[in-house]
Amino acid sequence: MSDFSIYLGLGFDHITDPGGYDHILFVIALCAIYTIRQWRQVLILITAFTIGHSITLALATLRIVEYSTDVVELLIPITILITAIVNFFHDERRSQFDVGKRAERPWSRYGLAVVFGLIHGLGFSNYLRSLLGREMSIVEPLLAFNIGLELGQLVIVALVLLVAWLAIEKLGSSKRTWTLIVSGIVAGMALSLILNNKLVAGE
């Protein structure tokens, strides 16, 4: 097996690992307001997140930027909590039909995904740097790892949209109810991660 394949698999496994579910929670929060019929919007959103985390993953792995691991570990669940809270105020009708000043701008959500992606990229780089060790060239592993992350994200997105389809189309749940339940669960788990981080930091 080539080094490229190894790091591709490591990237995929890292983001889909239930043991490190913070990144999974963020992707779920991003997708919670969408259905499978809106897959194009979801694809743009995930691409925005990928652009964000790719930038800082590369910069931090190449040691062009330095950061505090403890701060990043706290910021990641905060991004999850904020995304879930934003979902509570999402108005599907207003975002589609209201052309007034109060209409939700889709680009604001894409911008949020890019900015929060920058933070998650630092988290990814911490793991990747520990894997690289004394590797002479890190460009190929970096590229492979990033592609693996993207493939993992797409699998998570597909599963979220499938469950949403089952809940809304087959079980009769309203889209609003689905969004509130999923976002509420994610917000609760994110808050737990934040409190745990603060407790660890205080020890």
Image: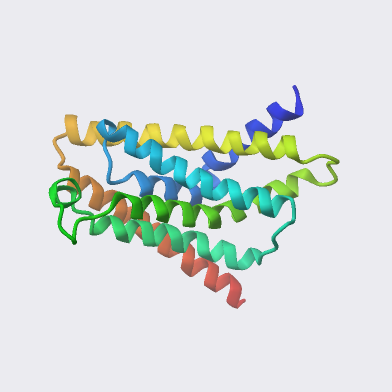
Pick the residue in front: 7 or 53: 53
Q: Quadrant of the C terminus?
A: bottom right
For the N terminus, the image quarter is top right
- Image position of 184 (left or right of 57): left
Query: Residue 192 or 111: which is nearer the viewer?
Result: 111
> Residue shown at 45%/64% (left/top)?
78
Identify the residue shown where x is 49% and y is 52%.
22
Left or right position of 202 against 44: right
- Judging depth in this view, the residue of 141 and 133 nearest the camera is 141
Q: Is residue 74 visible?
A: yes
Q: Position of residue 129 (x, y in %)?
A: 73, 49
Indicate the position of residue 166 as horizontal and vertical percent values.
Answer: 24, 31
Q: Position of residue 149 (x, y in %)?
A: 56, 38
Q: Is 148 placed above or below 99 here? A: above
- Up-down: is 72 above or below 91? below
User: Who's the residue at 47% across and 69% down the image?
Assistant: 195
Tell me how many marks there are.
0
